[in-house]
Amino acid sequence: MKYIQQHIPEVLLIEPQVHGDDRGYFVETFRQDLLEQTIGYKLNFVQDNESKSAQGVLRGLHFQCPPFAQSKLVRVIDGKVLDVVVDIRTGSPTFGQQVSVQLSCENRQQLFIPRGFAHGFVVLSDTATFVYKADNYYSAECEGGLAFDDDALNIDWQIERSHLQLSDKDSRQPGIAELGAIFDYSVDCYAD
């Protein structure tokens, strides 16, 4: 596997090595030891999640507040999405900046998203099946969100606004200026 730091260095694009022939293919999708070596700290993934969505469905931008903050390892097993993460760590030199990548069943790339980031995706294909690992359990009381259309973020979702499908909750999230200090860059976000 190849681990590629993005312009926000804590966010990693992961390119697996695909071994294929006329029978099909084999790909290793996860190696805890190599990921931990790359990021420099221990991870303990405790929950796997999967969603299937139609074209134009936008899920996000979501995060879990401490003490249920989550790192995620995300990928697409069918279809194509634009995956977006935003740094929401107060005091971070990249606060408010984003990483956007296309993940698809064809490129088999994954994105590692550490704690302290809001995450969302929009489906670019007819449908997409999105899967991810999380290193902490979901907690409804600790659920947080960030406005997908915040002018301060200026995210290009690659689909016209009129074609987006959002949940009621996702259409009413606060802008980044209204979030407050949920994650502090000077504090270790990765320790439990």
Image: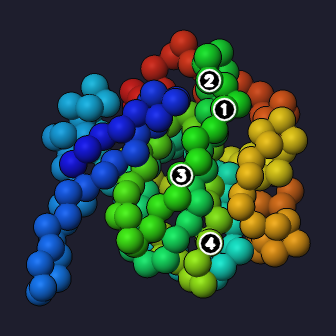
Instruction: Return the residue at label 1.
Output: 97
Instruction: Return the residue at label 3.
Output: 101
Q: Position of residue 85 (x, y in %)?
A: 59, 44
Whole-number angstrom distance, CA of label 4 to CA of label 3: 12 Å
Whole-number angstrom distance, CA of label 2 to CA of label 1: 5 Å
The residue closer to the viewer here, 134 or 81, is 81
Select label 3 or label 2 by which is in front: 3
Left or right, residue 163 beside residue 120? right
Q: Quadrant of the C terminus?
A: top left
Select label 1 or label 4 by which is in front: 4
Q: Position of residue 35 (x, y in %)?
A: 25, 40
Q: Number of labelled discs?
A: 4
Instruction: Return the residue at label 4.
Output: 124
Q: Residues within 10 Å of mark 3 (few under 14, many from 20)?
A: some
Q: Residues within 10 Å of mark 4 (few under 14, many from 20)?
A: many
The residue closer to the viewer here, 154 or 21, is 21
Q: Residue at x 31, y 30 (%)?
A: 39
> In the structure shown, which secondary structural element does the residue marked by tag 4 occupy?
loop
